[in-house]
Amino acid sequence: MPTGMYRPGLEDVTRYAFLIAYALSASSLCAAQQTNTFFWGFTLVRSHLSSPTVMNFTHR
């Protein structure tokens, strides 16, 4: 069973997408509060997606 086959790729894509979105929002908006809100929202979503509860619901 290839468990760790797709996960690193997904992690890398997510990280790069976040960095690109962060750079774009920082350069175009130049609003520290909005960038901060986006960062915390991303962190919350990410920790929520990796929580075991969500995995249990997904694999039902």
Image (cartoon, rainbow, N blue to C red):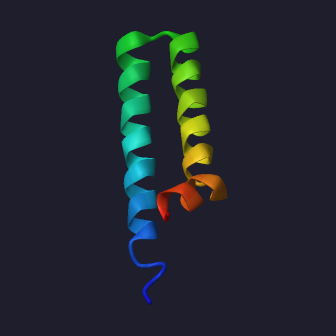
Q: Residue at x 58, y 61 (%)?
A: 56
Residue 59 seen anywhere in this rendered image of the structure: yes
Q: Residue at x 43, y 40 (%)?
A: 18
Q: Which residue lies most toward the bottom here?
A: 1
Percent position (x, y) of residue 14? 42, 50
Residue 51 seen anywhere in this rendered image of the structure: no
Percent position (x, y) of residue 5? 41, 78
* Figure check: 53 above or below 29: below
* Figure check: 37 above or below 10: above
41 left or right of 14? right
Give whichever of 35, 7 is nearer the camera: 7
Q: Residue at x 58, y 11 (%)?
A: 33
Q: How many marks?
A: 0
Q: Which residue lies most toward the front here?
A: 60
Classify the position of the N terminus by image quarter.
Answer: bottom left
Percent position (x, y) of residue 49? 54, 49
Percent position (x, y) of residue 26? 44, 21
Give whichever of 18, 55 is nearer the camera: 55
Q: Quadrant of residue 13?
A: bottom left
8 left or right of 57? left
